[in-house]
Image (cartoon, helix red, strand yellow):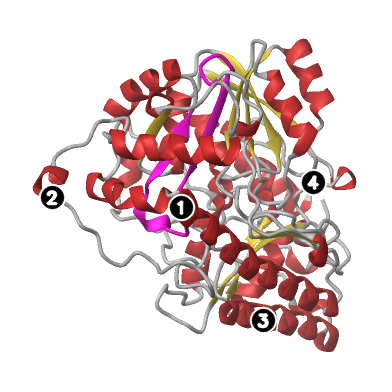
Amino acid sequence: MRGSLESPSCANELWLTDADTIRKYPGHEHKKAHAHEDNMPGIHAPGATGVIYCTDRAMAHGFTYEDESWANFGQGAPETGPLPDAPPRPDVVHFTPENLEYGPTTGITALREAVANLYNVTYRKGMASQYTADNVCIVPGGRAGLTRVAAVVGDVYTGYQIPDYSAYSEMLSSFRRLIPVATALKSEDKYALNIARVEEDINTQGLQVLLTSNPRNPTGQVIRGRDLEKLVEISEGKTTVILDEFYSWYLYPEPGKEAEYELGQSISAASYVKDVNEDHVVIVDGLTKNFRLPGWRICWVIGPSSLIEALSQSGSYLDGGANHPLQVAAIPLLNPDHVAKEKVALQKHFLMKRNHVLDRLQKMGLKVDVPPLATFYLWLDLSSLPQPLDNGLTFFEECLKEKTIVVPGIFFDLNPSHRRDLFKSPCHHFVRLSFGPPLAQLEKGLDAIERVLAKARTQGMSVFGHSFPSSPAKTFKALPRQAGGGVKSLISQVVGQ
């Protein structure tokens, strides 16, 4: 592995390969609420996502959510304020005493009907099979929706791709009946999902469930047209296709082709489902990203009515259902005319931010080889930088010194239950940058990256890759330096890799 892992100047830096194992390094430990929380009989902490690890490390540098001097390129949510030409933001919630009661675990009927109607109007005009409330389950957030689905999946091989959304790793680890089977997406293919390869894996490895995000986090790519149709056709056999469609409105043209692009488009597998109760297609989406309301935690799962019945049962013991008053408040937001205005305003604004960030990075000499055509993420390859800045983890730490958070690419190389050796991860030399925050915050972050690169030019590379401050908790003793074998040998002793 290149970068700080093997760099002689960084011999004291123990770079492990995911949030759980990185915390074993002195100074990177998780801040414990209680001194003896690891000693509770029968209790095992499952570990947090990589983004949470990044936030913990930022706090070691003084980051707080209230400090406006920081730029958070790690932010996995869009800006939530008003946008030019967009409908007004919801600022008042009206409800009756009846809305203070528990809601059904599948959600209130009126909201389920509104979701079904939006999908029928947007994606299923003229099709005989239409979604109804029976095909919709309202859930308290996207991860809750995915967790409900995972809870009803049996003992099957479950296909997933790398890189992809980091929370899938924890989900695939926690529900041990899902046997994860990875497929690596390649930059030379622009991170496209090879449908022929998927079909081969189904036939040769017996995949019964396929989990994928579309559009894809972190690469910003999207499956559409005939490829998406063929993916849906796979569900007509003996494989269930689960599609995380949370970025379905964040669609952009290729850079330089903006004049040819019609704003207001969106994408969904719902366009190609032939029979809503027979095709094995599960769609997860919600208000979080597209409607820019992440704090509401109102999302939905769409699929055959038999699935919705099963999700009602798993929801009864997993989460109990979504917030009742906010379900009521969400109904008018799903009006198709309202949605059409939101889409255009969102795409115009985020396209501007995408192009601005790409332009500034290119002027710094950081060209994004596969520009995002969807989401609000840039998958930035650092391999052209000199060691150790070509290492996503080192680049992340150096950005923290400049009050900017990025996410090392290693966290998107999903490794459920640490089953694979990640020393040669294809994601090691990447970072994910989010252009979800407001433009002013993006400018601060870009200025910070410029300062890191300027420091490399003026002071040389020997100043990088060490002298990182400790995380808030200091509960582990320093690990000894090895006389032979270097840092990699020490990592092998600590994590057994």
Q: Quadrant of residue 258?
A: bottom right
Residue most extreme to the left: 97
Q: Which numbered disc covers residue 426?
A: 4
Magenta residues, as a range? 276-302
Identify the disc placed on residue 96: 2
Q: Which residue is mark 3?
A: 448
Residue 251 location (% of width, % of height): 68, 54
Give the numbered dot on residue 80.
none
Q: Are marks 1 and 3 in contact (CB under 8 Å)?
A: no
Few, some or many C-alpha atoms within 10 Å of disc 3 (few <14, some 14-19, many ≥20)?
many
> Which quarter of the rendering shows the C terminus?
top right
Q: CA distance from mark 3 to mark 4?
A: 26 Å
Badge 3 amino acid:
Ala
Residue located beneath label 1 in the image:
288
* Disc 4/disc 2 C-alpha distance (Å): 53 Å
Spatial distance from mark 4 to mark 1, Cα to Cα?
30 Å
